[in-house]
Amino acid sequence: MKEEEEIEITFQPIKRIVIFECNEFSIEEFFQRIELMAKAEEPIVLNWAEGIVFLYIPYPYDSDVIIKEMLKGTMYWGLVMFAPMPKYQPLKKFGAREIPIIDQSSFSYLRQVAQWLKERIKT
């Protein structure tokens, strides 16, 4: 058996998230918009943490500048839509279609995003 070379494993956490557009909705309007997106056959997975349900759409990674920034720990999101949802539920049904809602509470950066969004609730 051939001896394996040791590899270096490095953890590089996300240091910054840049959000270009951020929209708060009532829970009803949020799910109405998600339902419209689902009808367009877009794959959708919603996130939940800190009593907030949200969807983020990453900024396209087709630029060398964006890729370099990502390698330094900066993520770019083109859009975030969110609504207060105090109680977690794993699925939202729209007729025969089910959209998963993932509890992201164990992911520090998504939990921090949810807290940031929660602080910006206007209603």
Image: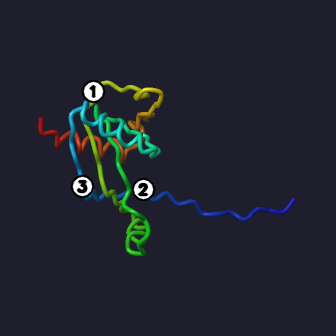
Q: Residue at x 72, y 65 (%)?
A: 5
Nearer the N terminus, badge 1 or badge 2? 2
For the residue marked with disc 3, what is the amino acid?
Glu
For the point 27% across and 41% down, which residue is it?
82
**SS type, badge 1:** loop
76 left or right, relative to 117 = right
The answer to which image quadrant residue 103 occupies is top left
Earlier-in-chain disc, 3 versus 1: 3
- Which image quadrant for residue 4? bottom right
Pick whichever, 31 or 106, lies toward us. Answer: 31
* Label 1, label 2: how far apart the Cα atoms are: 28 Å
Place of residue 78 in the rendered image (x, y in percent of width and height, measured from the top left): 31, 58
Mark 2 — residue?
13
Q: Amino acid at mark 1?
A: Pro
Mark 3–mark 1 Cα distance, whole angstroms, equals 23 Å
Q: Quadrant of residue 21?
A: bottom left
Query: What kind of residue is marked 2?
Result: Pro
Of badges 3 and 2, the one in the foreground is: 3
Q: Which residue is mark 1?
A: 86
Q: Measuring from the top left, give residue 71's x and y in whole percent.
A: 44, 67
Q: Which residue is mark 3?
A: 21
Q: Residues within 10 Å of mark 2 (few under 14, many from 20)?
A: few
